[in-house]
Structure formats: structure tokens, C-alpha cells
Image: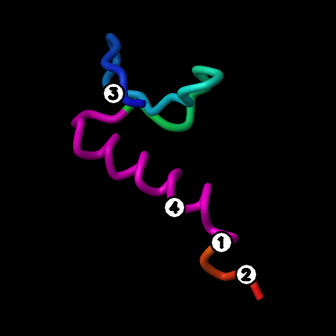
Amino acid sequence: MIVKRKLGYYVLSEKTKRNLGGPYKTKQEALKRLRQVEFFKHFKKFFKK
């Protein structure tokens, strides 16, 4: 989840509201980080032996 705060955009966990990155100047930068987090969240499924 991306939220706008005083210092910029932050990427937060939806369950725990934990900070996963930020502050970012633009929403596009925050979205890029969110995609990285989602990719590695499911990383094992793609490269499982």
C-alpha cells in the first residue's frame, strides 16, 4: 500500500502497516518499490526446484 505523508510517499505493509520503503519524491518511485516487494514476496514460487 502506498501512502502520502509530509516527507513523501511511503510503501507500507497492508497487514502490519510496517514501513517497506520511503520516503519517495514521486508516486511512481513508490510504485516501483511496491512491485519489487511483491516480486520477492512470491520469489520462491518462480524458482522452486
Packing grade of label 2 (10 A; few <14, some 14-19, many >=20) is few
Q: Which residue is mark 1?
A: 45
Q: Residue furthest top?
A: 6
Q: CA distance from mark 4 to mark 1?
A: 10 Å
Chain part drawn in magenta: 24-44
**Magenta part mainly helix, strand or loop?**
helix
Packing grade of label 4 (10 A; few <14, some 14-19, many >=20) is few
Q: Which residue is mark 2?
A: 48
Q: Earlier in the sequence, mark 4 or mark 3?
A: 3
Residue at the image position 42 percent from the left and 49 percent from the top: 33
Q: Earlier in the sequence, mark 4 or mark 1?
A: 4
Does 39 lie within the magenta span? yes
Q: Which residue is mark 3?
A: 9
Left of 2 or right of it: where is 45?
Answer: right
The foreground one among 40 and 9 is 40
- Residue mark closest to the camera, 4 vs 3: 4
Does 29 lie within the magenta span? yes
Q: Amino acid at mark 1?
A: Lys
Q: Residue furthest bottom?
A: 49
Left of 25 or right of it: where is 48?
Answer: right
Q: Given contact means CB atoms under 8 Å apart, are the residues at marks 3 and 1 in contact?
A: no
Q: Which residue is mark 4?
A: 39
Q: Amino acid at mark 2?
A: Lys
- Residue mark closest to the camera, 2 vs 4: 2
Q: Amino acid at mark 3?
A: Tyr
- With respect to residue 48, does 17 lie above or below? above
Q: Earlier in the sequence, mark 2 or mark 3?
A: 3
Residue at the image position 31 percent from the left and 18 percent from the top: 4
